[in-house]
Image (cartoon, rainbow, N blue to C red):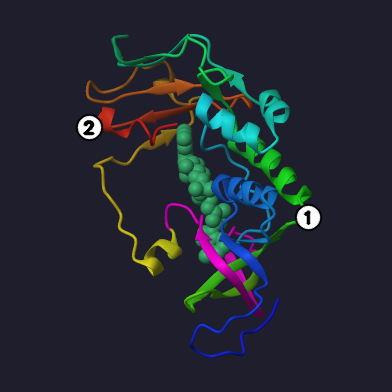
Amino acid sequence: MTHPQAEGGSEAQETDYDVVIVGYGPTGEMLAILLGQLGYRVGVFERWPEVYALPRAVHFDDEIGRILQAAGLREEVLEITDPVLDLYEWRNRDGEALLRIDWSRPGTRGWPSANFFSQPELQRVLDRRAKSLATVEVREGWEVGRIEDRGDHVHVEVQRGDSGQAGEWIAEDDVRWVTARYLIGADGANSAVREIIGSEWHDLGFVPVRLADPRSDPARSGAGLEPDELAVVRSDPADHDRVGRTGPASLGVHASAG
Ligand SMILES: Cc1cc2nc3c(=O)[nH]c(=O)nc-3n(C[C@H](O)[C@H](O)[C@H](O)COP(=O)(O)OP(=O)(O)OC[C@H]3O[C@@H](n4cnc5c(N)ncnc54)[C@H](O)[C@@H]3O)c2cc1C
């Protein structure tokens, strides 16, 4: 890693990487693999030293299956996924189906049309593949700070850190700069890169979802809900059941509820 000596302008220079990716969630991991496979020199910078261990995303369709296959991961991914062979349903407390998706038909792309998975497991599969590529350098425990657009390349400030006892980010004194031809923000819902490039946020009107532990919450079966509440119950391969309960705008939260 280098410190940028040049000030301003768009000096033609050899950069440390072709592409810097900010964030190493599933998006950053997949991008790193696909770009690395094409021969690009990729540097990934992720704030946290390890993959976040709790399950979040749980489902991908046959189209995403093809992308995972293009990353050379068909067999590994099939081993950690469960195809859905029937229906996905939301019911109210009277047992009436509010939402029903028929996933019983096979997908058209050589994959089941619906596949359930545990996000940490999938991320570990992607992680191994990314780190196996000579073109990809993954730096975990490095937070991206300032980003300077120099026209034909970009300067990126990265700072080493670690997680503290309470899981908080603790920055260390080690601050460096790297250069790249391109930078991609894959830094999640609270993306700093999005703010820096002035990308807009479109609010589709989703409402917050309260997640309860179904093992101790009677809402698991739908009983005990208010008439305008909703329970979503499913299991993932790691046996992490979860329940989402929403207010009147219930159907609007489909993409957020696990
Ligand atoms: C509680 C919860 C439940 C969810 N349930 C579901 C679900 O049921 N179904 C579903 O499809 N999806 C669900 N999701 C959403 C799913 O987890 C995300 O869509 C997915 O993780 C997005 O992947 P990503 O790589 O784009 O972003 P992220 O996974 O958020 O990864 C972004 C990464 O960027 C890193 N980063 C951020 N800023 C910086 C910086 N400045 N420098 C370095 N690194 C940085 C972060 O540490 C993070 O690791 C859920 C999310 C949560 C939080």
Q: Is mark 1 within 8 Å of ligand 1?
A: no
Q: Residue at x 51, y 17 (%)?
A: 108
* Upstream in sequence: badge 1 or badge 2: 1
Label 2, residues with CA under 10 Å away: few <14, some 14-19, many ≥20: some
Compared to 129, does 189 lie above or below?
A: below
Q: Nearer the viewer, residue 54 or 37?
A: 37
Identify the image quadrant of residue 178. Answer: bottom right
Q: Is mark 2 within 8 Å of ligand 1?
A: no
Q: Residue at x 50, y 57 (%)?
A: 187
Compared to 234, does 54 lie above or below?
A: below
Relative image position of residue 85 (x, y in whole percent): 53, 10
Please check the rendered image and state whether residue 185 is part of the magenta-colored stretch, yes or no: yes
- Amino acid beneath label 2: Ala
Identity of the residue furthest to the front in this view: 12
For discs 1 and 2, the disc positioned in front in the rendered view: 1
Relative image position of residue 204 (x, y in whole percent): 26, 42
Q: Nearer the viewer, residue 184 or 231?
A: 184
- Amino acid beneath label 1: Ala
Q: Which residue is mark 2?
A: 249
Q: The residue tagged with tag 2: helix, strand or loop? A: loop
Q: Residue at x 44, y 59 (%)?
A: 191
Residue 26 is left or right of residue 226, and the answer is right
Q: Which residue is mark 1?
A: 134
Per the rendered image, the range of residues in magenta is: 162-190
